């Protein structure tokens, strides 16, 4: 199942499901998915094997990471892949709700084992190690019926654009574009940070922002399920700003002993077809990396240059 048209409705459904069932997400916002196994094909680190589970930090980034509107359970490309990883390692996979900007600090503090769908930028490697597995670029989602239909980077001047706090592309554009607008005599460009995707979409619906800057796959899916309310725009020149094109990694703590087993598991998923199937199931045709690019810290991209 793909993303529901209303994030708010999805959240409400999730909350209802938890009250009724008494299981799934706890008070701390976690849920668990079992990974049955008759024997590990990939040996996990001792800490993971003794715990019997991988703890994964999850923030909304559809179609990679999203909640099923009927059950409240996490689903998406990353869930498909990580459930496969858990099966190969012979452990369960526990998905824990988190804000994006808290995920890498949470890895360092050992609250999580893995944080998926994080841009592998050189600057981030001081505190995390990345197993590269996907690619993306920044686009702008707009109200389809409005007068704002940007074509080039400078068309964003004089507008208020929302982005998710802590994301490289939004943070870079927020710092770079106002100066470019001023130099071109086009006024300024206001970039406003929001804590998560749900808050961004609510701001766009209520016209508190003119556009929503986020990775292309999420914006494509949101627009497709908005009943014509939203439209996703590839803005010429936006992906040339540092940090606005990305290679996604499954992040683990810096130099974690989990990095090599996770890489081995991901490579096995690529070989047996599960990797390609996960992207196909959630309609992300341009997100895959070639098998040779599924590697540790393989990206050469920077957030700031």
Image (cartoon, helix red, strand yellow):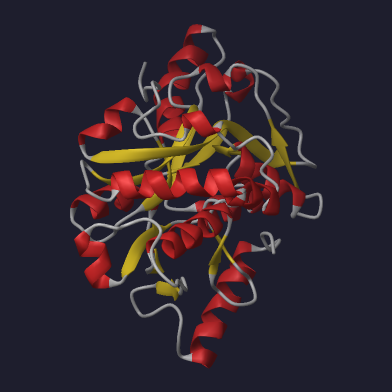
| Residue at the spot 48% in from the left edge and 7% down from the top edge | 183
* Residue 53 position by quadrant: bottom left
Q: Name the foreground residue: 292 vs 3.
A: 292
What x and y, as percent, mark residue 82? 47, 57
Q: Tell me: 126 left or right of 178.
A: left
| Residue at the spot 69% in from the left edge and 54% down from the top edge | 281
Instruction: Decide: is 266 above or below 21.
Output: above
Q: Name the foreground residue: 25 vs 84.
A: 84
Q: Tell me: 65 left or right of 216.
A: left
Q: Name the foreground residue: 54 vs 195.
A: 54
What x and y, as percent, mark residue 169? 46, 31
| Residue at the spot 50% in from the left edge and 89% down from the top edge | 19
Instruction: Decide: is 242 above or below 270.
Output: above
* Residue 11 position by quadrant: bottom right
Indicate the quadrant containing the N terminus: top left, top right, bottom left or bottom right. Answer: bottom right
What x and y, as percent, mark residue 83? 49, 62
What x and y, as percent, mark residue 105? 24, 49
Indicate the quadrant containing the C terminus: top left, top right, bottom left or bottom right. Answer: top left
Instruction: Decide: is 109 above or below 254.
Output: below
| Residue at the spot 39% in from the left edge and 72% down from the top edge | 30
Q: Tell me: 221 left or right of 76.
A: right
Q: Name the foreground residue: 234 vs 86.
A: 86
Q: Tell me: 163 left or right of 47.
A: right
How many discs mark residues in the rendered view? Answer: 0
Instruction: Decide: is 143 above or below 111.
Output: above
């Amino acid at each position: 199942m793909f993303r529901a048209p209303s994030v708010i409705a999805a959240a409400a459904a999730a909350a209802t499901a938890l009250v009724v069932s008494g299981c799934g997400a706890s008070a701390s916002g976690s849920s668990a998915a079992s990974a049955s196994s008759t024997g590990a094909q990939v040996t996990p680190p001792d800490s993971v094997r003794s715990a019997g589970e991988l703890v994964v930090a999850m923030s909304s980034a559809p179609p990679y990471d999203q909640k099923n509107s009927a059950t409240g359970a996490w689903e998406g490309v990353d869930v498909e892949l990580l459930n496969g990883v858990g099966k190969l390692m012979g452990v369960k996979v526990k998905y824990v709700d988190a804000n994006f900007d808290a995920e890498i600090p949470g890895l360092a503090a050992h609250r999580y084992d893995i944080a998926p769908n994080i841009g592998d930028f050189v600057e981030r490697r001081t505190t995390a190690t990345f197993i590269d597995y996907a690619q993306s670029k920044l686009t702008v989602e707009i109200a389809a019926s409005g007068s704002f239909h940007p074509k080039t980077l400078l068309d964003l001047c004089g507008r208020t654009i929302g982005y998710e706090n802590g994301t490289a592309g939004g943070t870079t554009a927020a710092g770079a574009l106002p100066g470019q607008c001023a130099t071109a005599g086009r006024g300024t460009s206001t970039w406003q940070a929001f804590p998560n995707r749900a808050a961004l979409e609510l701001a766009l619906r209520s016209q508190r922002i003119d556009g929503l800057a986020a990775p292309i796959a999420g914006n494509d899916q949101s627009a497709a399920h908005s009943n014509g309310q939203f439209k996703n725009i590839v803005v010429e020149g936006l992906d040339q700003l540092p940090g606005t094109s990305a290679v996604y990694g499954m992040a683990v703590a810096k130099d974690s002993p989990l990095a090599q087993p996770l890489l081995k598991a991901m490579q096995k998923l690529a070989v047996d077809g599960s990797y390609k199937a996960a992207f196909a199931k959630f309609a992300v045709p341009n997100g895959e990396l070639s098998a040779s690019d599924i590697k540790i810290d393989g990206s050469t991209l920077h957030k700031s240059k």
